[in-house]
Image (cartoon, grey):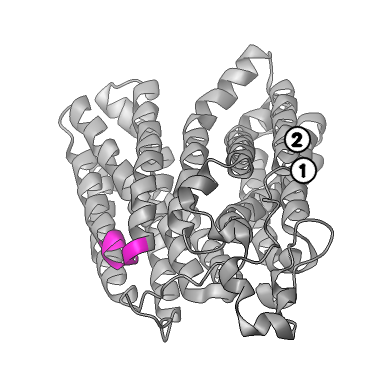
């Protein structure tokens, strides 16, 4: 494996910005637009159609684990290029499915594709290529990828209105094929650097030891609960506001402004990392998720709910970047792909059940306001768990780091843990 860093990681960043918008748009955001028409035209129940989509999320969670290990070892180019081929094939199969079994098979295949082309392998790529400058690259990627719904929701709506849902999926398959396959094959043709030597005892642990640690389990559980709350809240925001007597148009605007809040949150993440430690940063972000969800539960005016939706969007936007940096902040970049995949698996399962679980909770509690209060309590529990997610050996130099000559000349400051109120040094961002 090459020992040097890519001479121009910006090429990979540009390629991934394009492919993340396309991948999220075609594989994820197109479905909510097309689902009602699929149900109407095929006679398949809404529960079965939505269940097929959720099954794809679960498949992505499971397949993501070996994919993460493979990207760590070999780099992203051929993994993500093959994933694009699978994605185009899956969309083609979904669009031409003559029976429900073929439709389900298409979404199973789409789940495999999601594991290989969406955020986790992209985050692994930029984390390895950009090193200490990863936060800027990850922020750029998530900001651009946030446009996926803005671009593909109206595009898909226009396609289904003019040509029907099957032709819409065939068109999306073509878009994926002609954009993401060459973009991954060309844009990710970069030198894949070896991971840096571990800088602390926590980073020196094998991935198996790390994955079984109390801190990793606490982190995975906390982020799973928080992400479940974030997705259940956004999916049920419009029904909540309608139940408050607010018209659907205003509720849709609130949902859209929540997306703008995500952008604002992500823009501020670099500043947050400079001014806070790992533990405090994680707890604060998850508490913000809990607080904004509680506001949605108790506020009744249109203006108040719109403001709460923006705040919830900001928390959701920061949560994405918190997940992207959680592993490197605690255990370094050496096994980022594998550890992030293990962490992401339960998160994606939570995302898959969020639509159904959120609505079921509202029915069980006789209303959306009560269900949002319960969701806020779940997010608060996640914040409490996250306080135990930082390994105690984070700031203790590893054997390799202790032998470095620079350690005797003050570079040890770079290894100080950002686990409490002490902020991380600016150059770590």
Describe the element under mark 2 as helix, strand or loop.
Answer: helix
Q: Position of residue 428 (x, y in %)?
A: 67, 73
Bounds of the magenta segment: 73-81
Asked whether residue 306 appears in the rendered view, the answer is no
In the foreground, 17 or 327? 327
Q: Is the residue marked by circle 1 packed among few (<14), some (14-19), or many (20+) residues within 10 Å?
A: many
Spatial CA distance of label 2 from label 1 is: 6 Å
Q: How many marks?
A: 2
Q: Position of residue 277 (x, y in %)?
A: 76, 60
In the image, taking residue 189 as reference, residue 237 lies left or right, namely right
Number of the label disc, if any, that sits on residue 380: 2
Q: Give the residue pinned by disc 1.
A: 287
Q: Residue at x 45, y 55 (%)?
A: 120
Q: In the figure, 99 relative to 428: above or below?
A: above
Asked whether residue 87 appears in the rendered view, the answer is yes
Describe the element under mark 1 as helix, strand or loop.
Answer: helix
In the rendered image, the residue lying farthest to the right is 421
């Amino acid at each position: 494996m090459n020992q040097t860093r890519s001479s121009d990681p910006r090429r990979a960043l540009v390629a991934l910005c394009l492919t993340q918008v396309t991948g999220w748009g075609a594989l994820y955001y197109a479905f909510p637009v097309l689902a009602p028409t699929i149900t109407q035209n095929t006679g398949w129940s809404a529960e079965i159609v939505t269940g097929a989509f959720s099954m794809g999320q679960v498949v992505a969670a499971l397949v993501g684990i070996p994919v993460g290990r493979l990207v760590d070892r070999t780099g992203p180019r051929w993994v993500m290029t093959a994933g694009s081929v699978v994605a185009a094939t899956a969309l083609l199969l979904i669009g031409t499915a003559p029976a429900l079994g073929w439709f389900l098979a298409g979404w199973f295949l789409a789940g495999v594709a999601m594991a290989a082309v969406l955020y986790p392998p992209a985050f692994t790529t930029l984390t390895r290529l950009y090193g200490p400058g990863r936060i800027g690259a990850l922020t750029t990627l998530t900001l651009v990828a946030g446009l996926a719904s803005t671009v593909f929701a109206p595009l898909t709506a226009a396609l289904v209105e003019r040509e029907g849902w099957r032709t819409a999926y065939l068109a999306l398959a073509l878009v994926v094929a002609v954009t993401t396959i060459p973009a991954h094959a060309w844009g990710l043709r970069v030198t894949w650097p070896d991971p840096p030597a571990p800088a602390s005892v926590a980073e020196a642990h094998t991935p198996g030891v790390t994955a079984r640690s109390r801190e990793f389990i606490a982190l995975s559980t906390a982020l799973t609960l928080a992400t479940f709350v974030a997705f259940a809240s956004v999916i049920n925001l419009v029904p909540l506001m309608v139940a408050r007597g607010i018209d659907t148009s205003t509720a849709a605007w609130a949902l859209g402004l929540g997306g703008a809040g995500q952008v604002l949150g992500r823009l501020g993440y670099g500043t947050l990392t400079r001014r806070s430690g790992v533990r405090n940063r994680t707890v604060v972000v998850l508490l913000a998720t809990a607080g904004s969800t509680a506001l949605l539960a108790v506020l009744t005016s249109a203006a108040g709910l719109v403001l709460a939706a923006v705040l919830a969007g900001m928390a959701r936007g920061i949560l994405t970047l918190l997940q992207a940096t959680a592993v490197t902040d605690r255990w370094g970049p050496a096994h980022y792909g594998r550890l992030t995949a293990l962490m992401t698996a339960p998160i994606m399962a939570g995302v898959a059940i969020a639509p159904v679980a959120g609505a079921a909770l509202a029915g069980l509690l006789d209303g959306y306001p009560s269900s949002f209060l319960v969701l806020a309590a779940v997010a608060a529990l996640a914040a409490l768990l996250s306080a135990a997610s930082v390994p105690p050996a984070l700031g203790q130099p590893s054997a390799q780091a202790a032998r470095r000559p620079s350690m005797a000349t003050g570079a040890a400051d770079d290894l100080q843990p950002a686990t409490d109120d002490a902020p991380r040094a600016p150059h770590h961002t």
